[in-house]
Structures are given as C-alpha cells and as structure tokens.
Amino acid sequence: MTSRQATWICYPNDYEIWLHAQASVKRQFRGYICPPFWRLDGAYSNVMFRKRFDIAEEETVALSVQGEFVLHLDGSMIPLPYEKTQITSVKVPAGRHELLVKVFNDRTVPSVYAESASFVTDASWEATCHNGKWVAAAAVGFDDIACPPADFPFAYDTVRPVDTIATERGVVVDFGQETFGFVRLLQLTGRGKLRLYYGETLPEAMAGEMAETFDELSIDNELPRTVKTPVTRAFRYVNVQAGPGLVWSDIVHDYEYLPLTQLGEFRSSDDRLNRIWDVSVRTLHMNTREFMYDGLKRDRWVWSGDAYQSFLMNNYVFFDQDVTRRTLIALRGKEPVEMHINTIMDYTFYWFIAFYDYYMYTGDLAFIRHCYPQMMSLMDFCLKRRNDAGMMEGLPEDWVFIDWAPMELRGEVSAEQLLFCRSLETIALLAKELGDLDNESKFAKLAAELHERMRERFWDEEEGAFISGTLQGERIGQILKYPNMFALRFGYLNDSRIEAVKRNVMLNEAVQKITTPYMRFYELEAMCELGEKQRVLREIREYWGGMLDLGATTFWEQYDPELPAEAQYDMYGDKYRKSLCHAWGAAPIYLIGKYLTGVHPVGPGYAHYLVEPELGDLDWLEGTVPTPHGVISVYADRDCIRVTTCAGGSGTLRFRSASVPATNEGEIRLSGPGTYEIALTLPSSVYEVKRAFFSTPSD
Amino acid sequence: MTSRQATWICYPNDYEIWLHAQASVKRQFRGYICPPFWRLDGAYSNVMFRKRFDIAEEETVALSVQGEFVLHLDGSMIPLPYEKTQITSVKVPAGRHELLVKVFNDRTVPSVYAESASFVTDASWEATCHNGKWVAAAAVGFDDIACPPADFPFAYDTVRPVDTIATERGVVVDFGQETFGFVRLLQLTGRGKLRLYYGETLPEAMAGEMAETFDELSIDNELPRTVKTPVTRAFRYVNVQAGPGLVWSDIVHDYEYLPLTQLGEFRSSDDRLNRIWDVSVRTLHMNTREFMYDGLKRDRWVWSGDAYQSFLMNNYVFFDQDVTRRTLIALRGKEPVEMHINTIMDYTFYWFIAFYDYYMYTGDLAFIRHCYPQMMSLMDFCLKRRNDAGMMEGLPEDWVFIDWAPMELRGEVSAEQLLFCRSLETIALLAKELGDLDNESKFAKLAAELHERMRERFWDEEEGAFISGTLQGERIGQILKYPNMFALRFGYLNDSRIEAVKRNVMLNEAVQKITTPYMRFYELEAMCELGEKQRVLREIREYWGGMLDLGATTFWEQYDPELPAEAQYDMYGDKYRKSLCHAWGAAPIYLIGKYLTGVHPVGPGYAHYLVEPELGDLDWLEGTVPTPHGVISVYADRDCIRVTTCAGGSGTLRFRSASVPATNEGEIRLSGPGTYEIALTLPSSVYEVKRAFFSTPSD
C-alpha cells in the first residue's frame, strides 16, 4: 500500500519550468510586455507515466489527465468510453500489472491524477519524456482531482483604500501601503475608457503615462457590473481617470499573495528596529510567490543573485522550502546549458552556493540528489569556459555583474573566482554526501588548485587585501569590498589576514561605499562575522530606517541616503523606475535572525546549531528561528538569556558574561576570554542563563 | 534595398519543429491518440528579431507579430497605440537604425512580418532565442501579412463517392480509391449519434469498432446543416451508421493534400508498368505533406528511414525540396540529443546519408551549412556510444531495426556499421565542401579506420559475402542481403567481391527473402547496380503488380505475394492494421526514374549527370526527370534514343548498341564492349541517337 493521498504528477521540473515561463512575461512597462533576456523553456509535451502494482482483487481506478491521453494496461490499450469526461473510471483485474498513461499536452503541463483502493498517483510513479530514461514522477502540490497543475493557487484578500482624493478627471485611491494584485471597480456603469495609472508613490501615480505601469479598460456597461483589471500590478496608489459617462460605487483591490505561515519572529526594546523587521517581512513575503522574485513593480523576474539572498532570509521567517525548490529548478531551466543563469556569471555561482546553504538549513539530501545532474551539466559548462589561467573570465555574451557600482570587470575578476571556488567546494561536499566519491575528489582538487591560484594572484600582502582582479596577468582595478567580504564569508582567510581585511578594507572609509541593499547584505554579514555586530545594528537603523523616514512601507531596490528625497525613485535614468518593494531590501531579516537572535546551523539540517544572541545597545530582544525540527526561541537581556530548543539536533549557546554565569540546565564552560558556552543537548527544553552583561568589544 | 517580398520570419527550425509536434499527434487508433515514442520539442517561446538598416528619409513600417511583443528602435521602446491591432504602423526617421522586435509566444511560433519602403522581413533579419547567439531568421513560406505561420496551408478538393451501398443502420460510401481528408454530410437534420467507420478496404469499414479509425458525432440539428468530421482520416470506404432520427442529402469528402507540380513523368509500352508508376506517384503524393510521412492510416509519423526513401523518390517526380528540408529539420529536433532519431540507430544514419543525396540532387550547400551544427552534435552523440571495438552496438534504449524480418541484432550488426561508415564519409565530404578542413580530415580518418575494421571483421572470404555481425568478437547470425546490398550501394566492394556478393547473396535463392517494399527498395537498387535491370523490371511488375491485382489504389506497407488474399491486411496481429497507403510502397518511382529512364546526378546539384536509359523488354519508354536546372527528357525505343538536356550542368549519355550508332549532336565514343557514350554538353538541347538494339546481358 502506498500513501493514500493522491496528487497530480508531472514530469520532474516541468511544472516549475513551465510556470516560470508564464510568470516571467507578466512584467509590463507602459502597456507592453518586457520578456526577460534569457531563454525560457517549456514542459515536455509528450510524456508517459507508469505504475507497476499487484492487486488482490479487481479495483476501479478513478483517473483524470491534463492533456490528450491514452491508457495501456500490460501493453494493451484500454478502450475508454467515446464521451471523454473529466474523470475516467477504469476497472483493473486482480494481479500484477503495469498501467501506462501516454499524455500529449503542448499548452500547459502533461499531468495525471489516479486513485484506486490500493494505489494513487504520487512520486512512486515513473515518467519519461522519451529520452530513453524513466525517472520518478514529480508531485507538485496539487491534491484535488478537479484542479490540475495550472496557474498558481494564490490567496486573495480584499483591501479597501485608506484614502480617496478627487482629481479633475477621476480619483486617486491610496491603499495605505505597498501592495500587489488586481483593482476592482464595483457597480461600474456607463460607456467609455477607464485608465488606471499605478504608483508605488503618489508622484508616480500622478505622472500618468510616465508611470511604470497602467491599464486602459474599455467599458460598455448598461447595468452596473464589477470590472476587474486584467493583470496584477504593484502599487500603493491608483490614479483612476474616467470618461464623463462612467460612474461606480467603490474601488477595492484584491491583494494576491502566497499563503505562508510566519514562523520567525523578532521583537526588541527598539521600536524602530521592530518596524524594520516588520517591513522587511512584508517586503520578503510580497516577493515570495511562485518563485522568489527580485521586485514586484519590476523586474518581476527570477534572478539567481537576488533569490539566493531571499532563500537565506526565508530561512529566518517562513522557512518555506517549496518556494526555494521551485526557484532553483526554474532558474536552472532545461538542457542544454548555453548561457550563465540570467546571463550573469556570478548568478550561476550563487545558484551552486544556494545548494550549500539549502543543505545546511534543511538537510534535505533528496532534493540535492534530484538536482545533481543539472548541477553537473552547469558546472561542466563553467569548466569549459575557463581561460588559460584556469579562471572564469567574461566572454562576449557573459554579463559579469557583481554589483551596480563602478568597477573593473575585465579579465579575471577576483570576486568571480571566489564565487567559482566556493561553487566547486559545494559540489565536492554534495558529491561526498551523495556518495559520489570520484566527483568529490575531482571537484575538491579543482577547488584546491583554484584556491592556490587565487592566493598567489589576488592576495596583496602590501595592501593587506584581495585585489579586484588581473588582466593578462597584470593587476587591474582598485581595492574593493566585494572580493574581501566574499573571502571572509567563505572562510578563505587566516586570522592575520582577517584582521588586515577588516582594517584595510571593511572599515576603511577610503574604500568605495556600497549603495545597494543587495551587496550591503554581504557587507553587513561580513561585519557581523568580524565581531562588529553593534556597528551593523546601527547601520540597519540608519540605512533601512532612512527608507522608513522617506515613507517606505516596503524596502527598496536601491537607497542612497545622500540623495535628495525627490531623486529617490529614479533608476536607470527614469524618474519612477526604481522598484520600491524589492526582495533584497529585506536583508535585516537575515542579519537580525542570524546575528542578533543569533541562530544558525553548523551541521546539515540543524543537526548541530549555534545560538549566539547579541544585544548590542538593545535592552532586550526576543526572537524565534524556524528549523526542520521546529522553532528555536531566544530571549536575551543584559542579565538573562533564555533559549527554548527545537525538537531535534543539538546546539551550542555562546554568550559573553563579565562574571561566571549560572544556568538552570547543562554545563557552562569558558570558551574564551569572557565568553562561555553551554551544550544544548535537550530537545524542546528551556535553558536559562544568568549572566553579568558586558558590551561587545566593538561597541 | 533588400528583396521586396516580405515574408513571415521565425527562429530557424522552430516552425518545422513546432509543426512536427502538432502533426505527430494526429494519429488516432480507435478513438484515442497515439503519440510517438520519441521526444517532441517545441518552438522557443521567447525570441528576439532584429534588423539594421539605413534609410534616406522617414519611412512607415507595417508590422504584424504572432505573439505578444514590444518594439525597440536603437535601444528605446517605441510606444504603440493602446488598442492593439493585427497590423501596427510605426514611423522610423531617416538614418541608420536597429529595429528590435521582442516576441513571446508559447502557443504557436513567435514570428514577425514587416514591410517598409526599403526593407522587409526576410532571411536578412537576425533572431536569437537568448542563447548568446544571433543567427539568420528563417523565412518559412508564409508571405501574406494576414496569415502567420500556423496550421499548414493544404489544398482541398471536394470528392463525391463513386458508389453508395445501403446497410441496415446507414450506408457505406466508396470514394473509388484510397484518399485522405474530412467527410462532410450535407443538409444533415435531426438529433442523435452518427458513427463513421473508415476503411482502406471494404472489410475494414464493415468491421465497425475493429476498424483502425472511426468517429462519433453528436448531432442536434433542427434545421439542415453541413456537418464535417473533426480529424483527417485515410480511407476509401466510410461506413456511416446513424440513429433513426438523422437524415442528410449527400456525403462528400474533402481531399486534403499538398499542392505539388508533377515534374517527373514516365510512360512506356507496358500499361501495367505505367499503372504501377501512376499508383506509386499517388502513394508518394499522399504521404508528402507537411513532412514525408510513412503512411496515412498509420503511423502518420515522420520516420527517418522511410523519409530517406521518399526524398529519393521525390527527386524523380515532384522535386519539392521544401518538404525534404522541413522533414530533415523536424526529424532532428532540438538539442540535446538524447536518443537516436525515432529511437532507431539505423534511422540516425539515414538522416546523415540523406544529406549526401540532398547535396547530389540539389547542390544546395546553404541548407547543409544551416544543418551542419545539428549534424555535428548528432554525430558526437554517436561517437560517444561506440563500443570497445569502435563500433555502434545497441544500448538498452536503442532500437536496432534494419527491417521487419527475423535477424540477429545483438552485438556489432554489420549493416549498422556500413550505415555508420557512410555517415562518417558524408560528414567528411560536407565538411570539405563547407571548407571545414579539420573536420574533413577528422571524419575521413574515422571513416577509413571503421572501413578497415569492417573489412577485417565482416568480410568472409569463404562465404564470399559480408556476414551479419559479431558478438564479443564472435561471428553471429546467418548471411543476409542487408549488409551486402549496403556495401554494394556505398561502393565498398571491389569487382571480384561485387561478383561474389551477386552470386552468393543477391541471386542466391537460399538467402532469406525480403518482404517489405522498404528493403526491396535497396535490394532492387542493388540489383540494378549489378546490371540486373531486366530482372528488376520483372520484379516490379510482379511485386507491385501483385498489389494492383488485389485492388490496391495506393501501395502498401508490406506485401507478401505468398499470403492468401484474406490475410493481406493483417499487421502486428491485428486484422486491419496494415497501412495501405505507405510511402515506401512507391519505390518504383525511384527505380524507374534512376534505372529505366536512367537519369541521376554524378556531381552536386546535377553539375554533372548520367543518362543511361534501359528498355529491358519494353518496346519504348519516355521519361522526364526534374533537376535544379529544369527537366531532362528521355525517349528510348529499340532503334532510337532521344535526350532533351536541362538548362544547366553537363551530362553523359550511355547506351548499348549492337553496331556503331549515329547522333545528331556531339561525339560518340566507345566506352566498353557494345557500350557507347556521348557527352551532353549543350543545355536545353535535343540529342538523338540511332542505334542497333541488343538486350542487356542479364535479360
């Protein structure tokens, strides 16, 4: 007997890849589509599913198929009634059988749902796209026979405006905060054109055709009818302009979102910090949908570099691994690999590295096994593109990105080699975990060789820093934070070099500042790792708080505190292009969860974890961090730390104390000057420590 | 200024690949689809087209796009009117510009039509599927702005039945010959079910639900209306069974076909042979559609081995190279190559070899250049599958086919190695013609090595024949015609071995007989090459004439003269499964054109050609053979041979004469005992030879 819940099954990865193509062309700019500039793949149209089973007596199989289909039992076609119905019933006699469902569907995704007394469609079925291989079919979360895998099952809330302002030609409605979805005009009567100009800010909505998005509806309603806009949009304000003959009763909007349970929490004695956490959560939630998006007004695309950070943030608040898996599959697409992911070299590497973090946070080796062949072919693509120095150098069709900032991107960019090296290490580690020892040693060797080459070529002893890169063997570019913070992040520096990098680069005011929340993520993470958590806390308050001061209800794609307020929405030379609900703006979720609440895994799937709460100048904080074993809760104030462990794994609580601390549970051991540790070996238990607070060294 | 005829453009190969998927699932069996058991690919959904041009004054571009789209001029979006129309007009100012059309279309094929005073969409535009490369866009023969590339533009003729037989529940209509298309019931009134059982023979139509295909229509017509069947079918008879409440005036059918000009002709003093030619032409024509099909009742699929023979026949009657090109593209599909074409090892090789013949018959190097990358990746797939002996041996997912006949298919099948070797030679030749000298020498070397290995391993001096194959170095299988006729065909035998093969295999009654028209093609071709043309003429009369005697109006998938008439329609264990309109049944077109009319190219694109008419026991024959330079016409009787040359190339007329012949033009030279040649150097000219007939040696 298999599991009793039948579910729609597809060819593996096809639903995600198909959905990704659909979702990637929903972006519009002033009435026109903006398709992404990378290849979009589709589902295989011609797919076959099979199940072998042995039944003691005749059974009736209820079956529904998305696509045209034919059934074979033990190699012979089963005649079905002329009248095709949504659900077909087939009798199967007792005995050992093979049931085969051949499906053709070039519109959506070939898929099958079947249910009988002793078997159901699930991942125990096999599928083939006729490439000579049978693989496990994929269940994609659609469990209702009447609802095959199609448009994504979002949730909707009806939202009413908080304010309505009359204008010469209509009204402007304000929904009070950044939102996303459809607009509905209730009891709309009359004949004429209706134009809706969307704004993430009031000036954008008032800019009319200079707004990023707008809709025009042709209305011809003799009787009052509700009219809904055709495409989801990101906005706070809607400027509705109507012909003279049009009247309506109300304007509301349907907020479209992925239903998620918020498992991670954070509160502290600082309300501004709490507000930053809340706005970060809303920012991340809105961008967490079919996939991890970059932003909702634009690009509405799935970018690997952006998604990677979202995965890490997600681990501290929703811990929804379904969206992570969907995103990783969608980003990779189908064979053959012809370009870097999103065309960007660094984005290919983030994709690899995401699997390392995925493994650490979830321990889910099954998904890694599932993606392993695609991982290998993408790495093969990379290895073939190495230059004579064995390094990754941008070819004409490659985008070498790193950050929106002036920098030298020719030749061997050291930041790219660091990401490449980490990718090789990731594959070596995963190969080991999967028992593929040949590849483990192959990739460990490649990583070690690259490591050695990087150290020789990029470490400048005089500067005490990683240089930016080389071109034909010669050093080029100025000293930048990127390679240095990556080297810190990946643990590639010894103690003396860590100190050098901290002094010469990370805390050096002369080094070019980072102005994207995107790279501030790694910069502040590195600062935390360097023990500068109080400084990071201050920067969070200033940088993200600066956006709040300008009225942000979600966090932005870019923010430069030095710009005047009226220039804040400008991007790419266009006054309202900047995306004001951008996933990478939610970095505080990760920084707070990992470095203030202070929880992170140190073994796969939180088999072992560290809890190291950091108050900084806060009076108290309390946080909850989700894990595969349930949540870990942390409370800390100057005198007390209280940790409630999750139901599995084992942890280490690390904290500072000016005098010898006391605990209700476990043994305290001194682990460094003024630093103590307790092994958290008991599951679902409360450890309470009394300590004498003293501030961190950098405070 | 470019060519003035605008045409719809697509990403190269996408229209053919998309159309192939559509066409491949039209096959039905008793009400259900029969999708093929190979991967079906689709068009890229996200495609970008561009054109660079320089115009002296402002121009208005008329534009139509299949799919959602956006226009960019010199990198900036061109705002278009809100109201999207079928045809958009855009003004472009004077100067040098780049026009970019970004299209998304996941339903059909992204495509663009544009026309202005100085440029139009044609193959001078470029396209990308966002794989980092721009390639020439493909024009696919749709020249009307109102008709984008979609369903194939077939022609239709209305056909009335030649006979109508009343039955208990309706009527059986007879259209007089094998046909293909839709059925229409005129002025149909009433309410109830209508069932149509199709038969290529009367017994099949009368077999009701045991017929291969049938339709059920639900009728509810208060007033008389024409009702048309939904799917094209192959049939001669339709058994219409109607509920009591249904009446109609007439039953007609719409014959669906590809409009083709018949350029090749043949007539002779033998009416039976003339009828065989005519029925062959109809058989080939019916199967020549979007692609070269195997058969119309079934499989309605594109099979490489079948198509290869159709290409050769086509060269002697329609010379429609568009369908050949569409078929070669469709068969190959997209990257990555994961399986042999149609899953069959030999079918991969026929695909390569088809390019050799394509080049010889057309001289079209541009298409070969177009397909060259796909040729290389398919060959790369083959090379990686060689066994330790450097030979192609079937892997578990491979189908090693050769013919429907008992034979040993394990290990190194010699027929497969011969096809493989010819494939390598083909690539070497084409590489040379394309100036890719590295690959020329690489593949020439691979071919020579394989050649040597085949000679060592497969030639049995004692048997005086190629053996069937080896398994782990040991000879297996009996002596069969296949490897021997392939070795003859590819010129792999010296004169003494040719004689040995002829005696020991081809004319040896003890060797297993071939019973498919498919392999009779090569068998009879080989016999012709062995000088046994009179024997082949007799065999054509007997074998194909045998089908005529059984009432064939098109030629069959299989025919064994030794079976009783009532077992003739049986195939794969089903009484009416045999396809009675099967392309490979039309082999006489090729055999007659190449060996009786006697025309074939000996240089690429008929740059040089041979004319060697063979009367056998005929009193006279006249034939016309199409070439890229127009037709070559041949008349021959016992005393006279008259050749009208085509407008290009140069030929050699070869013939036998019992005494010294005379000619009106050119110089006669003795080329062997009783054999003379005249160089046909004048284009579009008549060469008339008087000779004294004597029969061929084998007669």
Image: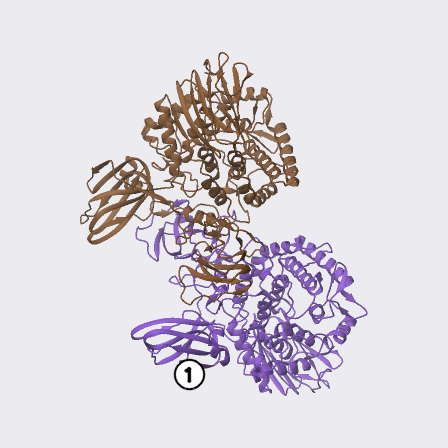
Chain colours: A brown, B purple
The residue closer to the viewer here, B606 or A623, is A623
B42 relative to B506 in the view: left or right: left
Q: Is residue B195 above or below residue A545?
A: below
Q: Is residue A55 above or below residue A174?
A: below
The residue closer to the viewer here, A259 or B608, is A259
Q: Amino acid at mark 1?
A: Thr
Outermost residue toward the front in this view: A56
Q: Chain of mark 1?
A: B
Q: Can residue B280 be seen here?
A: yes
Residue visible at 63% across and 40% down? Answer: A435
The residue closer to the viewer here, B698 or B361, is B698
Task: Rate crowding at label 1 as few (under 14), some (14 to 19) or many (20 or more) other CA atoms within 10 Å.
Answer: few
Outermost residue toward the right in this view: B462
Residue visible at 71% across and 60% down? Answer: B411
Where residue A597 appears, as percent x and y from the top left, is 44, 25
Q: Quadrant of the N terminus of chain B?
A: bottom left
Q: Is residue A31 above or below residue B200?
A: above
Where residue B249 appears, as percent x and y from the top left, is 34, 81
Q: Quadrant of the C terminus of chain B?
A: bottom right
For mark 1, what is the residue? B167
Q: Can residue A389 be seen here?
A: no
Instruction: Determine whether the residue tagged by mark 1 lies in a helix, strand or loop.
Output: loop
Where residue B189 appears, as percent x and y from the top left, is 31, 76
